[in-house]
Amino acid sequence: MPFSTYEFLFAFFVFLSPAFAGYVFAGYFEQRSFANKLIFLLVLTGGALDFHAMPVAPGRAHASEASSDEKSATSPIRDAVNQNTPGQSDGYPVGVPGHFAWYRGSHKPPGASAPPPDFTAVTGWGQVYPKVAAPKYTDPEGRIVIADAKTYVHLSVTREWILVQDQSAHGIAGAYFVSDFKPRPAPPLNLSTQPDGSVVIGYPKPGYNNHFWVIDRGTYPAGSVDGVYVQMDMRVSDPNMKFVANVGADWWRDASAVFLRSFVNNPGAGMSNWIELSTDWTTLYFYSWSTDRLLTDPPPPLAETKSSPTVVRRRASSWPTYLPDRRGDSPIIVPSPTSRVASHPR
């Protein structure tokens, strides 16, 4: 037998952990000659090092372990699935009661995948909260940017995805709301549209959130739609800003129905997991369907990249120089949210 039981055990543990070799080298080489085993051990050790250096399959890490590089090493459709799989949030929102169904992120009310049969409109929305357990952020220059918000509906008969809302054409509105959406006063939210069409807003203080939506509701014939898909890009201006965001959609009775606190005019289609924002662009996704159905018939933004892994997060070398200066540009003041609020399913 060319190698003893001792040597095979040694080789096994070296393969599992090269660091273990240091504890057993001395005993090993006392028992057998150095010359006839050195090459064997070097090969095993090299294999072990390669084994430990193998990259982990891409996917969203635990909130305390996730990094922007890790999040970018996946495909858009896989990232969309992660963002709509319960338990995959990067963190939780400050001020939202833990018993709320959407506190932990992904939430799809039963039967809400499709709109009520007599409804004819939909609105995609997003929201941003301070992250639980993160240091309080106080720099008045901090900003959040929203870009490329889009909402698609799926037609049940033709099986087509139709773009019904586009930020570039319909704009973004929003307001600060109390964290749990109770009807209490909140400060006004200033929005400023940039030359590239993105919208810049201030960050929410503890006790409040930023809630925003595409202004003009998307419309469709009653009874023709069986699903909705929303995506938008977000980023923050300062790496010290620790905020989580998610996106979702509300079905609306029609394009002009008023908001009622009973939500009879705008039941929620659902929302995605909480994603921690960074100074890199992050695409946030929501779909009302089951994941199996989405993978079978993905909307255009996901179908285009379904078969090839790409970088999910759009990188930027520096923060735009045209962000509004508090001493310069006058921000746009958004009207009271009572005129066109798109609230969540509470």
Image: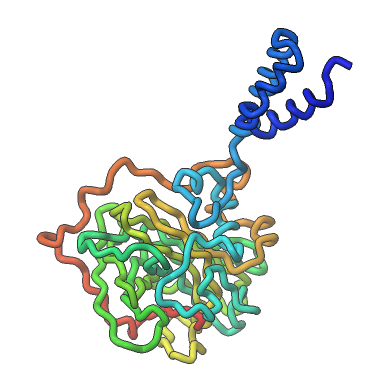
Q: Residue furthest left?
A: 327
Q: Is residue 18 left or right of residue 250?
A: right
> Which color scheme is applied?
rainbow
The image shows residue 341 at horizontal and vertical percentages of 38, 80
On screen, 132 above or below 39? Answer: below
| Quadrant showing the N terminus | top right
Is residue 50 visible from the viewing direction of this image? no
On screen, 46 above or below 68? Answer: above
The image shows residue 163 at horizontal and vertical percentages of 50, 62
State which quadrant residue 150 falls in. bottom left
The residue nearer to you, when weighing 168 against 205, is: 205
Q: Residue furthest right?
A: 1
The residue nearer to you, when weighing 216 against 108, is: 108
Residue at image point 25% right, 53% down: 195
Q: Is residue 241 left or right of residue 50?
A: left
The image shows residue 342 at horizontal and vertical percentages of 42, 78
Is residue 299 visible from the viewing direction of this image? yes
Residue at image point 41% right, 69% down: 127
Residue at image point 48% right, 64% down: 274
Residue at image point 61% right, 61% down: 160
Q: Is residue 72 left or right of residue 339?
A: right
The image shows residue 266 at horizontal and vertical percentages of 49, 83
For the image shown, how many numbered marks are present on the structure? 0
